[in-house]
Image (cartoon, grey):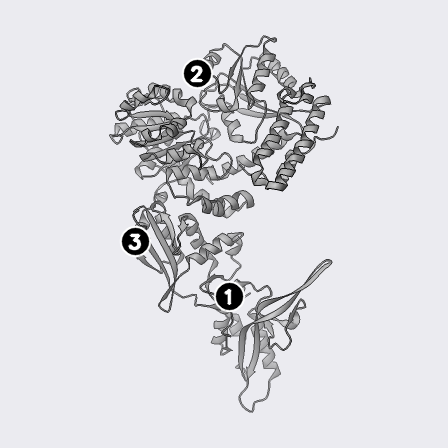
Amino acid sequence: MDMTNSSVAAQKRPFPFVPRIRPFVESVYVDRSAGLCDHTREEDAAVLSLEFDYPAGASRDSAAEMQARYMLEAFGPVELECMEDFAIAPGSTAEYMVHIETDVHQLCAFGAYAVPQLRAMGWHVDIDPDYRWHVVSSDTPWFASVASAEQDSDWFSLELGVDIDGRRVNLLPALLDMMDGASSLRSLVRATRRCVAVPVDDNHYLPLEPKRLKTVFGVLLELYGEETPAGRMQFARSRAGLLCRLEDAFDEDLDWDGDKPVRGSDVAYALPTNPLEIADAPAPAELRATLRPYQHEGLSWLQHLRSHGANGILADDMGLGKTLQTIAHLVAEKASDRADRPSLVVAPTSLVGNWKRELRKFAPHLAVVVVHGPKRASQWDYVAYADVVISTYPLVVRDRECFEQFDYHFVILDEAQTIKNRRSQAHKACCALSARHRLCLSGTPVENDLGELWSLFQFLMPGMLGDPQRFRDTFQAPIERKGAEERLDMLRERVSPYILRRNKEDVAKDLPPKTELVRAVELTGEQRDLYESIRVAAHARVRRTIAKKGISSSTIAILDALMKLRQVCCDPRLVSMRTAAAVKQSAKYELLMDMLTTQLAKGRRILVFSQFTSMLSLIAEGLEPLGIRHLSLTGSTRDRQARVDAFESGRADVFLISLKAGGTGLNLTSADTVIHYDPWWNPAAQAQATDRAYRIGQTKPVFVYNLIIAGSVEEQMLALQRRKRHLAQSILAPRGGVRLDSTEVDSLFAPLPGD
């Protein structure tokens, strides 16, 4: 609707009458035709009547009346006679409808822009008291009120609204409802819309320009707190600097009251997202290592983060030396006398030895205490005197009271995705630790879904991403289910100052190339028949379960069915069924043995990963008669490092590793071939396993093979891997499970392609 002053210029001479319009509410009958389905419904609509007030004794001027009609229609109303699908109630005086679809934003645009212009031209506009789309002036002054939350100086609350004739109206609840209810903020604030109608009360609206509203929505999304019963939004001190953007939205014409100085305290806007823009922090002389350029940038970033009182995630690609960068950071803190308390490193149990060795190697002057093992009770006596304390996630949970007795300089979570489940005891115990600074180390901060990112930030800076439900409603669901790019942009902008992510391809230019290949083999004969029989039965059970419980409550049934199909793909001997015992062929097992023989003849050194330890045992049995030297590493292996040292020294050519046990903490750069025997849909887990070989120190090209059964559930999993990888990259890139829906479930249980 184009409501410009061109309509005013169209009136070349005064009318011989005073045009009078009256907006009111009228019931109309709407006739919708859709193929064979016709129906009529009654609804309320905004309509107008047009009258001409002639002076006493004057004659009617048909030409002038027609000109007045044309002028009115130029502002948007549509003549009822032209609307075939609408019928006005008998006896009505309505002649025009303001907008066919009764769009509240269009209705308020008419009231906000057309009505003032018509009145300026001398028209009389009598708005019916029952008219539900009254507008208040767009020049109505705005106010913002900031107050400290009770008993917590790090939390504040915001009220935002307008002052109507001395009466303050808080619009924050209405704005939040609009923001949460819109299917797409981009469509709501599209530039082609003259205004967006913000509810003031039951029948009054404030017209707000889309550009201004977009800025306001952006601030509210990034402030990201919890709405209180009083209609105020709570937010953490770390987000307060965003309030300055409100001044930009209102051209600084915003009446502030309350704690105005807090608006300058947001850390994020002092944190450049590009490490090259951060002041250089020299490597401490006490560090016994030469840092690569990108590792030096990482140290500078960690120091810069600490200097601003912020916490973050060092999310470098696996194998780029996150441990070394962290040790350099701890050494720098000790050298500056800031580390007058111990720093705590919490790691998976399998990485305790690695941290102890790396600290002894690169920072032997630091006093290290390892709280681990059955005799750990005596170690607590030394914690207060240590520079670095190393322990594990299970022990932080089990010995929670002991860990909470100390105030730490840093709490560092290695493989921080361990606390990705906010309901887990590990997450709760780590969040309860007291420390000046917190740091997460994880090459995979988003493995399955964005809720995992929320869990890490809740540990780092509680409240920064709001409460879990609001985070799901505002970010997670729109991004994961609807692909909402504007929400993704807002979330990325919110978290990027606190995440440092570098990929091998970008910073480790001296690394040799890595080639990823998919080797597919088809099932035939009895193994194919076994797969199809299990698939049909499993799919039927899953569909019944989903129909009864819903897909969100059917996860266990789905995973159980998928596991049976994956076992058939791996080897029928894994399937505990009488019919499976009769199947003697295994297409993938035979492919693997052929590959190992061929690759070893070329001088390759090979890592084989599988999620099934029983499959690794079958492979080991098959290697024995072939005389192939091999080692195995699973969760039950006690001395992991001894196995690693044996392989690295050349005492075996094939290393069989369970995906869970071998995904972290291993440096196996003597290997140049990685085989994933049974791919799963978590790309992060496989990438971590691959990077046991493809990491700093590797000098040979690395070949990575994914073995799959063509057309099976495994091939569908590769597609899911790509989706999950895209989710993680969308958040971590400079500029995260994808839950299964019913269509995806059906595709996983699709039949094998025909012969």
Tell me the element at label 1.
helix
Which corner quadrant holds the C terminus? Answer: top right
Q: Earlier in the sequence, mark 1 or mark 2?
A: 1
Note whether residue 212 is visible: no
Residue 109: mark in rendering: 1
Tag 1: amino acid? Ala
Locate residue 318, reporting x and y percent.
46, 27
Which corner quadrant holds the N terminus? Answer: bottom right
Q: Is residue 495 above or below residue 692?
A: below
Q: Earlier in the sequence, mark 2 or mark 3?
A: 3
The residue shown at (35%, 45%) is: 238
Q: Is residue 676 above or below residue 444?
A: above
How many residues crowd mark 1 within 10 Å: few (<14), some (14–19), many (20+)? many
Tell me the element at label 3.
loop
Residue farthest to the bottom? Answer: 57
Locate residue 526, reporting x and y percent.
72, 22
- Tell whether 151 sits left or right of 515: left
Question: What residue would you read off at disc 3?
Answer: 259
Q: Quadrant of residue 246?
A: bottom left
The answer to the question of whether label 1 and label 2 lie on touching residues, with beta carbons closer than 8 A, is: no
Locate residue 334, reporting x and y percent.
27, 28
Q: Is residue 524 above or below residue 404?
A: above
Per the model, the C-alpha gap separating discs 2 and 3 is 56 Å
Locate residue 271, reporting x and y percent.
36, 41
The residue shown at (42%, 40%) is: 496
How many residues crowd mark 3 within 10 Å: few (<14), some (14–19), many (20+)? some
Note whether residue 311 is visible: yes
Q: Earlier in the sequence, mark 1 or mark 3?
A: 1
Residue 307: mark in rendering: none
Per the model, the C-alpha gap separating discs 1 and 3 is 35 Å
Between 560 and 473, the one nearer to me in the picture: 560
